[in-house]
Amino acid sequence: SVCGYALMREDGDGQAKCQTKEQVKEHPKVALQQQKLLDKDRDFIRMIFDKVLFNSGNYPEEQEYQQLLDETFLQSQYSDVCWALNQFDISSGGTNKASQIKGPVLIYHGELDIV
């Protein structure tokens, strides 16, 4: 998405976007999923994949799915990806950086895409 994925936290005034990498790492969703990755919790990660990646109901063959899970557990930069998504926003509703892009842009997004 051109809007990234802002992670919100509670502060004294209500909801505020996480401003530091540490706040992102400590965010309950990030911390939980990071721990599930470290634990190699196949059932949990598969549940996430089923809801987010394969939400159309079009699943890979079981052997391919298991390989996908195996590869997922090799990734070690999950909180960095979350930080990048938290920072990225070129939408006109955010920082309006989209208007500064001088070349052609293709935004590819399926009708059923959640992420």
Image (tube, helix red, strand yellow):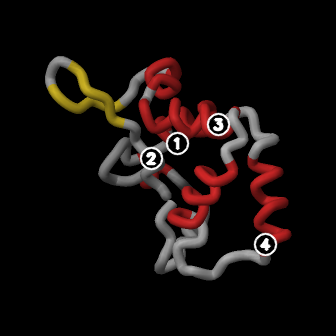
Label 1: which residue? 85
Residue farthest to the left, as pictured: 13
Specify which label sits upstream in the sequence, 4 or 1: 4
Identify the residue at horizontal 67%, vertical 77% (top origin): 59
Numbered tag placed on residue 43 in the rendering: none
Q: How much space separates mark 3 and mark 4, taking CA atoms?
A: 24 Å
Q: How much space separates mark 2 and mark 1, taking CA atoms?
A: 5 Å
Q: How much space separates mark 1 and mark 3, taking CA atoms?
A: 11 Å
Identify the residue at horizontal 76%, vertical 43% (top origin): 73
Label 3: which residue? 78
The label nearer to you, 4 versus 1, is 4
Secondary structure under the numbered disc 4 in the rendered image: helix
Identify the residue at horizontal 74%, vertical 75% (top origin): 60
Residue type beneath disc 2: Tyr
The label nearer to you, 3 versus 4, is 4
Secondary structure under the numbered disc 2 in the rendered image: loop
Residue type beneath disc 1: Leu
Q: Residues within 10 Å of mark 1 (few under 14, many from 20)?
A: some
Label 4: which residue? 62
Whether residue 105 can be seen here: no
Label 2: which residue? 5
Q: Are marks 2 and 1 in contact (CB under 8 Å)?
A: yes
Q: How much space separates mark 3 and mark 2, taking CA atoms?
A: 14 Å
Seen in the picture, residue 69 relative to 23 is either above or below; the reply is: below
Which x, y percent locates residue 81?
61, 38
Specify which label sits upstream in the sequence, 1 or 3: 3
The label nearer to you, 1 versus 3, is 3
Q: Residues within 10 Å of mark 3 (few under 14, many from 20)?
A: some
